[in-house]
Image (spheres, rainbow, N blue to C red):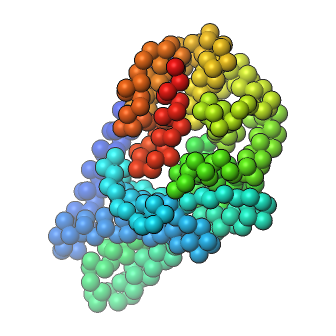
Amino acid sequence: MKNKSLKKIFKTIGSMLFGAIGGLGIIMFIDNIAQDMDIAIFPMLAIMILTFYISITLHELGHFFTFILNGIQIRMLTISIFSFIFDGEKWKLRLNRNNIGVGGIAVPNLTVISNEEEFKKTQRGYANAIIAAPMVTLTLAIIGALLLLIGFLKHGIINSYILIFGGTLLLANISLFLGCFIKSDAVYGDFRAYSSYKNDDFFAALMMYQYAMFSIDYENTRLNNSYLKEILLKGFEERAKDKRTDLFTVSCANTFIDEYLIGIMDELSKSTIDYINYYYENKNQIIEKQETEQHRLLLLHIAYYFEKEKEHEKAVDIYDSFIKTLSKSPVFDYWKIQGEQIIFKKDHSKYLLDKKNIKPSSIYSVFKQLDGLYHDELILNQIP
């Protein structure tokens, strides 16, 4: 464990140094370009930054409008610190200082899906919305390339700032486009997500069902989406039988256990209980191999499950070995305090029932304006 911690420290320091050196190099490179083109560096930087954010915005709008064209309502559109939230009647602008950065997200408003026809229609709509954004990004990259090409062919006729705009547009959107091919245990790029939405009913049902907690009518949407739940139960049973520990199997198990803990499900399926026992018995190997937050979150919820089922020693074992030893962070600190209340019966209710302290996972900074984020945690945090 000590060697692992030292590796993380060196990795963090190395990343910071790399970022600092890289940032300095980029600034010096931009300054040289500005001098060569005889233009001021600050307007040049402003054009580059603005162009980058325009690219991000148009990428997310590709998702946004395609959802709408496929008959799917939007719940939230976020670009950096700006979140546009629909409450069923009107749009509201909210500023989220915790979300400063380069990212964005378009969140659909899931409604109740009652049968296969509705599921397939929604599945196609989600897939279309996912693939639309990379197509927008590719188009922007082509526009940037054309601006540069025209600039080279007609040297001196096109303004230097337009050439900067074209170059930034090309580079920014090539980067975004390549990012759409990413596939890892924790991240699915748009192309990978599109393929999975289109061809994998389990994946599509899981993503849709997890969006339910952010819906306008999130309580009703979760309680009445029994058709999606049937797809998940069937798919999970097959995955649990194979003892899979990929991100989506773990995420589905987390969903079932969470709903059992807060009373949405009266009992867990045999496949879920068997999976809990397998995960607990092999927790050291699984966590060593899978370092995602979701894998640790499942272990935390398994500890709460054991506590509810009067298996206190197992719950304490998980807390002492895997929760208490987590590094300091807003999410992990919240888990530790929550664990102390649920497992050790320490009264932190005043802290845990205050929404501003609830940080169940790293996505909290993006979804903090949506009440559904807090629903399960507020119930869980009342468990004596």
Is 332 rendered above or below residue 376? Answer: above
**Could you say where residue 349 lies in the image, as x and y percent from the top left?**
42, 24
Q: How many marks?
A: 0
Q: Answer left or right for 78 relative to 315.
A: left
Asked whether residue 341 is in view, the answer is yes
Pick the front one: 144 or 219: 219
Instruction: Kindly identify the residue that appears in the image at 63 percent across and 20 percent down.
Output: 308
> Residue 266: horizontal and vertical position, in percent?
71, 32
Q: Quadrant of residue 37?
A: bottom left
Quadrant of the rendered image containing residue 198: bottom right
Q: Nearer the viewer, residue 285 or 22?
A: 285
Q: Nearer the viewer, residue 213 or 239?
A: 213
Judged from this view, the residue extending furthest toward the top is 313
Q: Is residue 172 visible?
A: no
**Above/below status of 345 relative to 334:** above
Left or right side of 283 for 37? left
Q: Residue at x 42, y 17 (%)?
A: 347
Image-based side of 313 in relation to 176, left or right: right
The image quarter in which residue 39 lies: bottom left
Q: Residue at x 31, y 73 (%)?
A: 164
Q: Is residue 169 above or below residue 325?
A: below
Q: Position of residue 182 (x, y in %)?
A: 58, 53
Q: Residue at x 36, y 42 (%)?
A: 18
* Residue 99 x/y as whole percent: 36, 50
